[in-house]
Image (tube, rainbow, N blue to C red):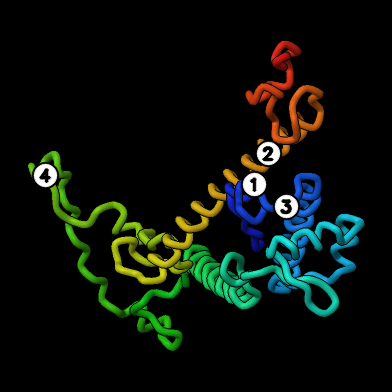
Amino acid sequence: MPWFKTTDTLMTDAKVMMMPLNERGMALGTWIACGTWSTQHLTDGKVPAPIVEAFVGTISGAETLVEARMWKRIRGGFQFNNWPKYQFTREQIETKRDEDRERKAQWRATKDKKSQVKGGNVTDMSQRDTAGTSAESALTRPVPTRPVPSRPLKETGQVGGGKSPKQDTGNNAPDIQPCGKAHDPDDACRACGTARKQAEADQITAKRDQRSTEAKKRARVAHAAITACNFCNAKGYTPGGKPCRHDLDDEVDS
């Protein structure tokens, strides 16, 4: 799922601060709503005018964005400025989806192969026998000499030696690595390195988006408090030039 990216300094950006205060909320709501729509439908920042009207009921917010040089007019609608510089393009998203599908397909194929190996039936036929071996030859074949069982380590005084239990069982197949393939984690694998870097980048992007969401929430709360307050101006200051707390009547300087 692609993400529409923004920054935690959006509310203090010079272009946003240039907007009239009574038009700023409508313009930014239009910008975010249409940005998520464009990312979802892979239009690379092109937004038809009917889509703008469907989201906010008017194109006045779009006109404010054009005046602030965040959008520009195109035939039939509007276009985000510098979309490829700040957002994922259609080509990038489709390439990422193809890579994810291929990686998942490789992972499923490797997993199915391992399941078949672990759950496969063991033939009753000995490695020394063949389908054409007769019962008579089987009876006349000399019985191989059986090896003398080794004495326990405690009796022989030996401390180590021989294969480990993991080697004897044969269940030491390597786990699936970040590249989607099964191999020793100590082996150098470029695909694993790329997958780890992508995971780190995704984590950084997620944290940045979370900070942006929290900043937007704080901005909405502050704007709502200023709007509901009867003592401060539109910027949240009392007549005496102090930041208004919006909750104490004696905050206002007489």
Disc 1 to disc 2, C-alpha distance = 8 Å
Q: Where in the figure is residue 246, as x and y percent of width and height?
A: 73, 21
Numbered label attached to residue 159: 4
Which of the 4 quarters of the picture holds residue 166?
A: bottom left
As shown in the figure, which amino acid type bears the numbered disc 1? Met
Q: Where in the figure is residue 73, as x and y percent of width and height?
A: 78, 73
On the image, numbered disc 2 is attached to which residue? 219
Camera-side mark, 4 or 2: 2
Disc 1 to disc 4, C-alpha distance = 71 Å
Disc 3 to disc 2, C-alpha distance = 16 Å
Disc 3 to disc 4, C-alpha distance = 81 Å
Question: With respect to residue 247, does 26 lie above or below?
Answer: below
Q: Where in the figure is residue 49, as x and y percent of width and height?
A: 86, 69
Task: First in sequence, mark 1 or 4: give its number.
Answer: 1
Disc 4 to disc 2, C-alpha distance = 70 Å
On the image, numbered disc 1 is attached to which residue? 11
